Amino acid sequence: MAHAYESLSDPKDLRHNKLHASDRAFHDWYRFVLSYPPHLVRSYFDKFALGSDAVVLDPFSGTGTTILEAKKNGLAAVGVEATPISFLASRLKSCWDVDATQLCAAADRVLARLEMHEQDALLGFTEEQQSLILKNSIGELPLHKCLGLVAAIDPEPDLLLRDVMRLALAYTAVYNASNLKFGPEVGVSRRKKEDAPVYEAWRAKVAQMAEDLASVKHLSYPTTQVFQQDSRSVGDVLEAQSIDAVITSPPYPNEKDYTRTTRLESVLLGYLNTKADLRALKQGLMRSNSRGVYKIDEDDLLIQPGSSVDVVARAIEQKRIDLGKTSGFERMYHRVTRMYFGGMQRHLQSLQPSLKPGACLAYVVGDQASFLRVMIRTGELLAEIAEGVGYEVENIDLFRTRVSTATGEQLREEVLLLRWKG
């Protein structure tokens, strides 16, 4: 199967992945380092010629880039996200009903509570909580301050105000209090912080959020909904024939455990306390790495023998045998590849009843060479799967290229464009 490749217009702008200063409001409340940029989303609003009554879906919502940009541009939007901390971010960043003055007053009450407990013994994670985060992710004193903030925020009676302040803490914990670094994988910096101005940084973040909220106080804006749901069964939470366009970026098949990126804040806010919690979370996510595979998984059974995905998976397994690799996770590589694309097939099929006839879809995906350096052309393979379940493939746009850490060669990041005729 061959498809024409087309470069996006104005590549200098569109392939730049950083957040523009003009896009800062709401987007930087909490954002993944590798999130695709808002201007890429806007380019597909234009390309799809969406009317003011269109409804946009992001079924892998992450921290809400697509749905927030839809709201900013006067479009109704729906987000679906399985990870609790990301679901929190998507929901709050696109909810503009919070009163800025009340938010600042609540933050001041939180700080007043903290003053009453300044001399308390150091707070810390349990041994099992500690085992869930990267070693040396955060020092004892910064962690104590973060946990103190959690305890001081919890008594707030207004749940929406409380959640916004918890999201501010998630940002502060990672970017002001922790020893974490991102480049692009999450790791721990050599320079460890023995202390950090956690309270001051948190209060400044809340003030920034309040400023953003005040700026839209007198505006009318469309409805935005966010559901916490496995994207492979996205149809369970969506109304029939309700979606005009999909703009999203699913995980890549890259042996990356995406839960590691948000592990510190997930434990801090109580979303993960035990290894059982982590296992339950991973079981509700698209399979993209060998550490997230379970005996109950069946997505790989959807991949047909002789298909392009099957050929790639067989090549990965043969490479493992040729190299004499015998570790458990390496023996799982070929199955992870099948499960990833099988999971994407489940997603695309579950989505169909919710799409209006003529709906346009854009999937930001990337080539991978993580599994024993066997190239996975993600966009092309997904295009074949999408055609197999009834979508029309309109194009594969080049978003940008990046250098593979495994092979040193240029890998393509692309936007797979589909249409659902119904």
Image (cartoon, rainbow, N blue to C red):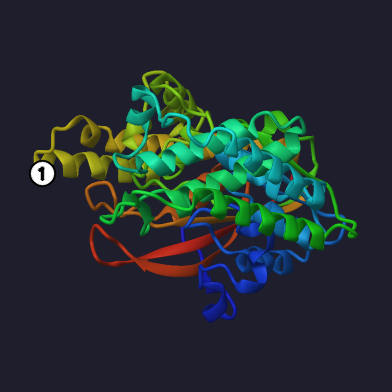
Q: Residue at x 50, y 64 (%)?
A: 3
Above or below, comparing residue 43 to residue 304 in the picture: below
Quarter of the image with the C terminus is: top right
Compared across the picture, whether 108 is left or right of 285 comes to right
In the rendered image, residue 310, in percent from the top left (x then y), is placed at 35, 40
Q: Residue at x 86, y 57 (%)?
A: 217
Above or below, comparing residue 21 to residue 289 in the picture: below
Element class at badge 1: helix
Above or below, comparing residue 348 to residue 405 in the picture: above
Query: Which amino acid, by three-letter code, is at mark 1?
Result: Leu
Do we see residue 184 in this rendering? yes
In the rendered image, residue 134, in percent from the top left (x then y), is placed at 32, 39
The image quarter containing residue 295 is top left
Do we see residue 226 in this rendering? no
In the rendered image, residue 283, in percent from the top left (x then y), is placed at 46, 26
Residue neighbourhood size for the residue with mark 1, other residues' Cα within 10 Å, grouped as few (<14), some (14–19), many (≥20): few
Compared across the picture, whether 2 is left or right of 201 comes to left
Residue under label 1, please give it: 323
Which residue is at the front of the view, 79 or 148? 148
